[in-house]
Image (tube, grey):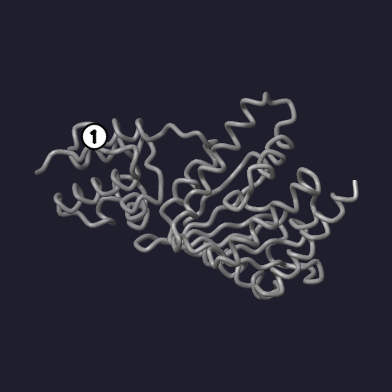
Amino acid sequence: MPGPKKLDPSASPRALLGAELRHRRETAGLSQEDLGAPLFVSGSFIGQLEAGTRRMQADQAARLDEVLGADGFFVRNCAALKASKYPDHFAEATEAERVATTIKEYAPLLIPGLLQTEAYARAVFRAYQPTATEDVIEDLVASRLERAQILADPTTPMLWVVLDEAVLRRESGGRAVMAGALRHVLGLARQHRVIVQVLPFSAGAHMALQGSLKLMFFPDAPTLAYLQGPGTGRLQDDPGTVRHHELTYDLVAASALPPAASLALMESVAEDYAHDDQQF
C-alpha cells in the first residue's frame, strides 16, 4: 500500500484527507456502508467525508485509524485540520461552502456574507460585538472578505440568493454604506455571477419565516442544509430534512419577484439611499 498522502494546507486539506480515506477504504475492500457501520454513521456520511463536505471528528478519526490500520494518520491530520478562524458552529459550513458547486440561500435580515462589502461587514460585526476592539473587528472583516473570494471563479459556485425586502430596508451602517452594499450585489448580478431575487413584504407569510436557510450542493455528495441563529448554527444532512428545506427554498423563490424586477427594486432603493445621504 502506498504511504499516506501528505496534506497541503494551502490547497483543500479536507478534500485531500477525504481522498486518502477513499483510497484506504477501497484498498481494504470496504464499501462506504461497511466502513460506516463500526463508526455508527451511514454510508452517505462516509461519502461526505471522502468528498470533503463534512469535517472529520476526533473520535471518528481514531476509529478510522483502528479499522483501516492507518497507524494514527487520521488522528494526526484531523487534529491539524481542526483549527479554524471561524466559530465551531460555522466552521464546518464554511468549509463545505468552499467545495459546493451550487449554493442557494434565503436571507431574511442581512445581505449574505459572500455578498457583503467591507463597509457593510464592518457595520454588521460592530453591531454584533459593540465592545470588541478595533483589531478584533478588522480580523472578522478580513475573514469575511476572504470567504467571498470563492466568487472570484467566474462560474463556480453557482450562487442563487433570495433577499427578504427587510434586507434592503434595514439601514446597516448608514445610508451611504447601504447604497454601496446594494450596488455591489447589483454589480455581481449584472455580471451574471449571482442570481438575486427579492421577496417583497407583499408576499406575506411563507415557509421560511423562522429564519435563514442555506443549501449547498456537491457533485459527489448529498446536499447539506445550514440553519443559523444568534450564536448558533446547524448543518443538516438527513435526506428527509434536507428535502423539506429544499421545498422551503423553492416556495420562497417562487413567491419572490423575478430577477429583473428584483434588480429594479434594489436599484431604486440604492438610489434613494444615495440621494438622501447627499442631502445631509
Above or below, 191 relative to 82: below
Residue in the picture at 61% in, 62% down: 161
Marks counted in the figure total 1
Closer to us: 85 or 261: 261
Closer to us: 145 or 233: 145
Question: Which quarter of the picture shows residue 134?
Answer: top right
Above or below, 163 relative to 90: below
Residue 155 locus on image (x, y percent): 44, 63
Question: Which quarter of the picture shows residue 140?
Answer: top right
Q: Few, some or many C-alpha atoms within 10 Å of disc 1 (few <14, some 14-19, many ≥20)?
A: some
Above or below, 35 relative to 9: below
Residue 185 locus on image (x, y percent): 64, 58
* 248 left or right of 257 in image: left
Residue 43 locus on image (x, y percent): 32, 56
Q: Residue furthest left?
A: 1
* 271 left or right of 98 in image: right
Identify the residue position indicated by label 1 in the image: 73
* 262 left or right of 226 in image: right
Q: Residue furthest front?
A: 278
Question: Which quarter of the picture shows residue 76?
Answer: top left
* 240 left or right of 76 in image: right
Residue in the picture at 36% in, 53% down: 48
Kind of residue at disc 1: Phe
Q: Residue furthest right?
A: 280
Q: In which quadrant is the N terminus drawn?
A: top left
Residue 255 locus on image (x, y percent): 70, 74
Residue in the picture at 30% in, 47% down: 18
Residue in the picture at 50% in, 64% down: 240
SS label for mark 1: helix
